[in-house]
């Protein structure tokens, strides 16, 4: 039951600090973030208990990790030994997780809701007895994923006054999907990998459905549902749901989607002819990363993602492909020549475009954010493992024409880099253990120089250098909100640009004259691109979309703006001619249109922070023990087995001891011990067993004790593995001694020593992958 310490393995320098109801385990570099989290745990748990109307007494083990440079967390509601895993990397401003007042509060709040919710025990005596063998309670077993994840998402918003329920991106997704008739069916509400953003629907649509149910029946309805699901009388989810809401969840969800679609269509009607989404330039499926126009204005690069292939950078020509258009017209002419009564297909949307160059980024976990340099190469980020397997984001340079790729930094944890015009240096975000800062990076030798301080209380994101290289615009999260900031690199002087209070901010980009900043702003229920004067002047919306307009990328001559437009199939590339005429004022979009617009937040009471106790070395951790038992019967007789398993939370050590036997079966015991507290894993395995077929109830006549024998043995082993960008290598050593003592023969003894080594490599392209090893 140990939660694997992914990335930061058991051999790392772990420490532990304890509060009244938590044990927080973390690698030493995460000390500042661990203290920030620990100060909030108890108060968040109290507040969650009030909302869920249940508070267990279990002490929760919390593991702080940062294995893949992504923002995430998980909860493991094991009765008697619950776990919480928190990843330290904060989310980017433009992500679905980018709406928060404090990253640790929303992360801990969401996962604590899972624990408090799913650890509510059954009041049925048989189920309570069963939970002692299968340590999972009824809600975790019976509730669908949309209900559990939707509930945690709903309460993350109520706990913090922010989160996904109050974010403009959730509203944009639900609104766009509703207008297109693409809201998930009830069967797909718990998550489907067959559609774009399908796996996020338990969080987005599930939380909105639960909000709608609360509006119908009151906030006491959901706690009543959980009480019915854990009642003395055994009920399934649908029966428990019907008893609270009067109808099945599937039927009420259909009503919810009908009302949501009506609200989305109402918004479309109110916006009317004032919608401005530019012209479709590239029709894509699935996810798409940020576009960027080359400095000569001839090419556009973006990240392509789909369900079956790794993400890849793709370079497109901006000029229209006249030869391809001529080929299409010629094919159409030939079609009509062969069959004059045929009807050519209607042409809608942009013409198909094929990339000139691509670069696959298999297994990378950060946004590449490609940026052009003057020589036509591209600066990008991607993750690769260090020898311990931890993924770090580093900078790379790609020359599309030749395919050459150079690695510029090693283990520097850099992302969102933007190069200077001369290509000698770049500004990037350095993100380590929940701390972010802006840094200057030399592209010649990878040297990193800090520009801002790194603290848990401030998050930096999306730096963009002005064309003259003297200023950098970036997003800063401080005191519960994102800010758009322009910093003079020579003096360090900063200007905070005026933006609406509580607005969503994302994806800044300079205009070519370095006088204005394009910025994605969530305001009035919509998520669109605005342009701001960096000298404190006016802010004007450039787009007005029913979905969302994201990632602005202006052309060098300032005559057009490329951006990503959200629809239910994914993100498409659109083009807007500049300058664009002013848009009329946005019509009011009130609460009656929720969740097609974000609901207004309810400010929570201030969180009372607790003093953080001193930490101590993790050592061997706290041992957790469990019994193992088994048995059976058959023609050869009856047998029974009893054992114990012990280990610590992060898997630094594990012990397994078993003993068993019966008439005619193997009788004896075995002990196995593993130690992973060093870079080399050590193991010990010892056993003794007596095998007596002569004692079986129906022994074969005449054999007597001819097949009886005793076995004894012990083995010792040591092995280690080191990761690399191409695979990895490992080595090991083992020694063992074994003795067999037949009843009618001389005993046999074997002693051996073994050495082993292995090297492994893997790779792939497109839908094909390969792997090989030599041992």
Image (spheres, helix red, strand yellow):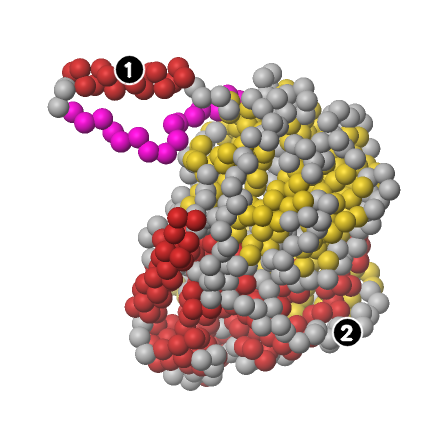
Horizontally, is 724 left or right of 523 in the view? Answer: right
Q: Say which residue label 2 marks.
A: 610
Q: Secondary structure at mark 1?
A: helix
Q: Say which residue label 1 marks.
A: 330
Q: Residues within 10 Å of mark 2 (few under 14, many from 20)?
A: few
Q: Position of residue 68 (x, y in %)?
A: 64, 46
In contact (CB < 8 Å): disc 1 and disc 2: no
Q: Residues within 10 Å of mark 1 (few under 14, many from 20)?
A: few
Q: Examine the rendered structure and indicate whether residue 98 appears above or below residue 320.
A: below
At a point 59% along the width and 80% down the height, the residue shown is: 50
Please report whichever mark, 1 or 2, sits nearer to the chain's N-terminal start: 1
Q: Residue furthest right?
A: 491
Q: Position of residue 721 (x, y in %)?
A: 69, 39
**Camera-side residue of 125 and 568:** 568
Residue 742 badge = none
Task: Tell me if I can see residue 273 in this picture.
Answer: yes
- The magenta region covers 342-358
């Amino acid at each position: 039951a140990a939660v694997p310490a992914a990335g930061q393995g058991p051999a790392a320098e772990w420490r532990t600090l304890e509060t009244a109801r938590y044990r927080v385990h973390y690698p030493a570099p995460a000390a500042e973030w661990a203290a920030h989290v620990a100060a909030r745990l108890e108060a968040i748990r109290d507040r969650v208990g009030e909302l869920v109307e249940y508070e267990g007494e279990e002490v929760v083990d919390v593991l702080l990790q940062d294995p893949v440079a992504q923002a995430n967390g998980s909860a493991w509601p094991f009765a008697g030994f619950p776990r919480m895993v928190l990843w330290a990397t904060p989310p980017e401003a433009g992500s679905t997780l980018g709406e928060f007042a404090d990253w640790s509060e929303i992360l801990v709040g969401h996962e604590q809701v899972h624990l408090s919710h799913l650890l509510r025990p059954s009041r049925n005596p048989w189920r309570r007895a069963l939970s002692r063998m299968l340590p999972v309670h009824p809600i975790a077993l019976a509730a669908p994923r949309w209900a559990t994840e939707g509930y945690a998402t709903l309460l993350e918003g109520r706990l913090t006054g922010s989160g996904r329920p109050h974010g403009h991106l959730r509203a944009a997704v639900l609104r766009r999907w509703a207008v297109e008739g693409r809201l998930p069916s009830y069967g797909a509400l718990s998550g489907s990998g067959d559609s774009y953003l399908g796996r996020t629907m338990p969080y987005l649509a599930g939380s909105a459905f639960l909000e709608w149910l609360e509006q119908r029946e009151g906030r006491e309805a959901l706690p009543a549902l959980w009480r019915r699901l854990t009642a003395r009388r055994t009920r399934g989810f649908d029966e428990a749901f019907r008893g609270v809401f009067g109808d099945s969840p599937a039927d009420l969800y259909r009503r919810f989607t009908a009302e949501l679609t009506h609200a989305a269509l109402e918004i479309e009607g109110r916006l009317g002819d004032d919608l401005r989404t530019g012209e479709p330039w590239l029709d894509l499926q699935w996810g798409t990363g940020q576009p960027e126009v080359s400095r000569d204005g001839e090419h556009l690069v973006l990240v392509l993602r789909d369900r079956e292939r790794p993400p890849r950078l793709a370079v497109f020509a901006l000029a229209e492909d006249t030869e391809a258009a001529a080929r299409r017209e010629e094919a159409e002419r030939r079609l009509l020549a062969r069959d004059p009564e045929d009807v050519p297909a209607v042409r809608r949307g942009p013409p198909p475009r094929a990339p000139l160059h691509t670069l696959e980024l298999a297994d990378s976990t950060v946004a590449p954010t490609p940026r052009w340099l003057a020589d036509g190469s591209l600066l990008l980020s991607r993750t690769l493992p260090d020898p311990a397997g931890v993924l770090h984001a580093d900078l790379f340079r790609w020359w599309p024409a030749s395919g050459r790729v150079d690695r510029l930094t090693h283990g520097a944890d850099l992302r969102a880099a933007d190069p200077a015009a001369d290509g000698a240096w770049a500004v990037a975000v350095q993100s380590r253990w929940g701390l972010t800062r802006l840094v200057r990076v030399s592209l010649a030798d990878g040297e990193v120089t800090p520009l801002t301080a790194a603290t848990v209380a401030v998050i930096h994101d999306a730096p963009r250098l002005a064309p003259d290289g003297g200023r950098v615009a970036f997003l800063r999260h401080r005191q519960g909100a994102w800010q758009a900031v322009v910093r003079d690199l020579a003096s360090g002087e900063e200007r905070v640009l005026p933006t609406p209070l509580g607005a969503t901010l994302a994806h800044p980009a300079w205009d070519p004259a370095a006088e204005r900043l394009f910025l994605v702003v969530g305001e009035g229920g919509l998520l669109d691109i605005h342009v701001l004067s960096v000298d404190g002047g006016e802010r004007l919306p450039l787009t007005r979309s029913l979905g969302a307009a994201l990632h602005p990328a202006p052309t060098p001559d300032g005559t057009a703006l490329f951006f990503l437009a959200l629809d239910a199939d994914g993100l498409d590339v659109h083009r807007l001619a500049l300058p664009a005429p002013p848009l009329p004022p946005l019509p009011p979009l009130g609460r009656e249109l929720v969740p097609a617009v974000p609901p207004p937040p309810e400010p929570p009471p201030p969180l009372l922070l607790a003093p953080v106790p001193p930490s101590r070395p993790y050592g061997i951790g706290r041992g957790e023990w469990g019994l193992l038992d088994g048995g059976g019967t058959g023609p050869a007789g009856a047998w029974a087995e009893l054992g114990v398993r012990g280990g610590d939370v992060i898997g630094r050590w594990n012990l397994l001891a078993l003993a068993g036997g019966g008439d005619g079966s193997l009788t004896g015991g075995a002990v196995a011990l593993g130690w992973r507290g060093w870079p080399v894993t050590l193991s010990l395995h010892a056993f003794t067993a007596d095998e007596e077929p002569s004692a079986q109830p129906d022994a074969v006549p005449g054999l007597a004790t001819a097949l009886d024998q005793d076995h004894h043995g012990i083995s010792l082993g040591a092995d280690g593995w080191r990761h690399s960008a191409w695979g990895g290598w490992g080595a090991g050593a083992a020694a063992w001694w074994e003795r067999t003592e037949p009843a009618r023969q001389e005993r046999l003894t074997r002693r051996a020593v073994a050495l082993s080594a292995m090297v492994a490599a893997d790779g792939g392209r497109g839908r094909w992958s390969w792997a090989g090893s030599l041992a």
